[in-house]
Image (spheres, coloured by chain):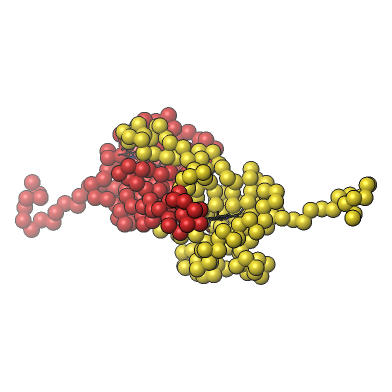
Chain colours: A red, B yellow
């Protein structure tokens, strides 16, 4: 009802992002693994983790402890003419511009109990993506439940 | 002549590796970029840098300052059945076991003046590869001279 009254400030929308802003220094986090998605995604990606996440990965701790944050970065999948010339054949693909935003999984067993203890967030160009909520992400991670909802394994 | 004399200890072979041992903590270094080599290499790779190297990459410093070390890690290029199932099509490739060793470029403008200031080293399973010297590597990096002999660009 309040929304309809002229002159009343619009109610603040419920916060939809698990992270209000990009975790400071996430680009400096340590590497968990790398991957290539072909198909429509057509990217090269890196999975990074904060200290708590990397420690848990390396020690095989399941479930991951509160405070663990995992970041998925992705870049354009770009054939490298320079590298191909050196190798003498078309074989080299390198990272181009960032794409598909940066996705995060944030562990808090109590706060996100309904989704296995993980909150999910996506940032495009540094800004939380409007309307993306945990419900857009968590169901898809369900098949990875035996590894605490993480598809990615640590690359030694 | 000495080698031929029985009872004389064999002369120590000249040290061929630029790095006597793996730089401590290199797996914790920050990410510069990722790549996929198809063809015979058939790998996913990550380029990491120590603090001096990452700072120079981010600030665009050329040539790289002494003390910069860059590491090239590589893993098997493995289709992920689990990820493909989630995505509904074959498109996902992840890092498997390490392969092709770990390669390093070490900057010391004076020591390696003959090869653009870079020393090169390769480790397989933690051990410097017997017989691999700078001469096995530097000529191939010559085309990247305009970027201080580095093919890889920083992935933002
Ligand atoms: C269509 C299914 C699907 C949806 C929807 C999805 N994910 Fe994922 N996610 C995956 C798969 C499969 C992987 C592993 C392969 C990869 O990285 O591409 C993954 C990987 C990740 C990773 C790296 C850790 C891991 O589990 O491997 C993060 C972080 C992540 N997703 C966050 C999110 C966020 C945030 C959202 C929603 C905004 C989301 N995901 C939506 C399927 C999905
Ligand atoms: C056949 C040509 C060739 C030879 C030989 C070669 N490299 Fe490279 N190297 C490349 C190319 C092309 C790249 C970039 C693409 C990639 O990483 O596959 C590269 C990348 C690298 C990188 C990452 C930084 C960069 O320049 O992008 C390091 C470190 C490296 N090489 C070290 C070595 C070492 C050590 C040796 C010798 C033991 C060696 N290389 C031999 C062609 C070569």
Identify the residue shown where x is 54% and y is 57%: B49
Left or right: residue B93 versus residue B20 is: left
Left or right: residue B132 versus residue A88 is: right
> Of residues A77 and A117, which is closer to you in this image?
A77
Identify the residue shown where x is 36% and y is 55%: A98
Residue A76 position in % (x across, y down): 36, 52
> Of residues A132 and A98, which is closer to you in this image?
A98
> Of residues A50 and B112, which is closer to you in this image?
B112
> Of residues A42 and A124, which is closer to you in this image?
A42
Residue A78 appears anywhere in the view: yes
Residue A23 position in % (x across, y down): 39, 53
In the rendered view, tell whether residue B92 sits above or below residue B11. Answer: above
Residue A152 is drawn in which quadrant? top left
Quadrant occupied by the N terminus of chain B: bottom right
Q: How many marks?
A: 0
Q: Quadrant of ligand 1?
A: top left
Residue B59 position in % (x across, y down): 47, 67
Residue B106 appears anywhere in the view: no
Quadrant occupied by the C terminus of chain B: bottom left
Residue B67 is drawn in which quadrant? bottom right
Residue B101 position in % (x across, y down): 60, 46
């Amino acid at each position: 009802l309040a929304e309809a009254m002229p002159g009343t400030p619009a109610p603040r929308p419920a916060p939809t992002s698990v992270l209000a802003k990009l975790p400071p220094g996430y680009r400096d986090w340590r590497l968990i693994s790398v991957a290539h998605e072909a198909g429509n995604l057509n990217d090269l990606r890196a999975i990074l983790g904060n200290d708590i996440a990397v420690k848990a990965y390396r020690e095989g701790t399941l479930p991951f402890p509160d405070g663990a944050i995992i970041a998925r970065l992705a870049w354009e999948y770009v054939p490298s003419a320079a590298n191909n010339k050196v190798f003498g054949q078309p074989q080299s693909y390198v990272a181009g511009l960032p794409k598909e935003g940066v996705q995060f999984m944030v562990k808090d067993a109590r706060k996100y109990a309904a989704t296995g203890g993980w909150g999910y967030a996506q940032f495009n160009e540094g800004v939380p993506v409007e309307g993306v909520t945990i419900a857009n992400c968590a169901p898809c991670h369900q098949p990875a439940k035996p590894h605490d909802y993480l598809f990615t394994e640590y690359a030694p």
